[in-house]
Image: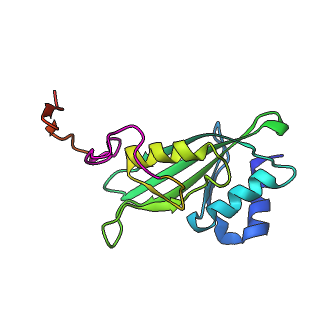
Amino acid sequence: MTVQEIADAIVAKFGEDAILEKKLDILQPALYVNPAKLVDICFFLRDTEPFYFDYLSCISGVDYGVKENMLGVVYHLCSIPNEGFLLTLHVKIPRTTENGDLPSVPSVSAVWRAADWLERETYDLMGIKFENHPDLRRILCPDDWVGHPLRKDYEVQEYYHGIKVKY
C-alpha cells in the first residue's frame, strides 16, 4: 500500500474534489482533504480493506497566521494491521467567518473515539469548533478563559479573577 494508492481510492470513491492537495515526498506523507468530505473519508479509511486505519494517534491545530488567514487541523492515522502504516490528513479552513463565529470542521469522534478529547484540546487552544462533537467544551483552560492561547494573534489577558496572568 502506498499513499498514492490511498489517494487514488479516495478520489475513486468520493470524487476529484475529495483531495485538494498531496504531499507525498515527505517523512510522513499527507493528504489535504475537502472538509465537507472529511468524515466520510475517515470512515472509508477506517473500515475499508486494505487500509484499516484503526488508530487515530493525534489531532493538532495549526495556525497559518493572520496574513494567510487560515487555520488547519492535522489528523495522524495509523493502520495497526498494516504494520503501523502512517498517514496524515490535513484540513485547512479560513480563520475568520462572515458572522464572527469560530471556524469549524466536522467532528471525527464518531469514527475514532480518541477524537473526543483531541478535538476538545484543539477547540480550547486554537478556537476551532468541531461540528457534531458530543461534548465540545474547554478541556485545558477554565470555562471562562478569554481566547485561544495557541493562536498566533492571541494576547494574554492581564488578570484572571484578580490574579495577574502576565509576568
The image position of residue 28, as x and y in percent, is 65, 39
Q: Which range is magenta?
A: 136-153
10 in relation to 75, above or below: below
Of residues 142 and 68, which is closer to you in this image? 142
Residue 56 shows in this picture: yes
The image position of residue 104, as x and y in percent, is 46, 61
Q: Is 108 left, or right, of 162 in this rendering?
A: right
Of residues 142 and 56, which is closer to you in this image? 142
Q: Is 95 left, or right, of 29 in this rendering?
A: left
**Residue at the image point whose x is 25% and y is 47% from the top:** 146
**Residue at the image point whose x is 64% and y is 70% from the top:** 17
* Displayed quadrant of residue 59: top right
Q: Name the quarter where the C terminus is drawn.
A: top left
Q: Is residue 36 within the magenta segment?
A: no
The image position of residue 154, as x and y in percent, is 26, 45
The image position of residue 107, as x and y in percent, is 56, 57
Q: Residue furthest top?
A: 167
Residue 61 shows in this picture: no
* Displayed quadrant of residue 29: top right
Q: Is residue 140 within the magenta segment?
A: yes
Q: Is 150 left, or right, of 158 in this rendering?
A: right
The secondary structure that dominates the magenta segment is loop
How many numbered marks does the figure carry?
A: 0
Question: What colouring style does the render use?
Answer: rainbow
**Residue at the image point whose x is 37% and y is 61% from the top:** 102
Q: Is 144 left, or right, of 123 in this rendering?
A: left
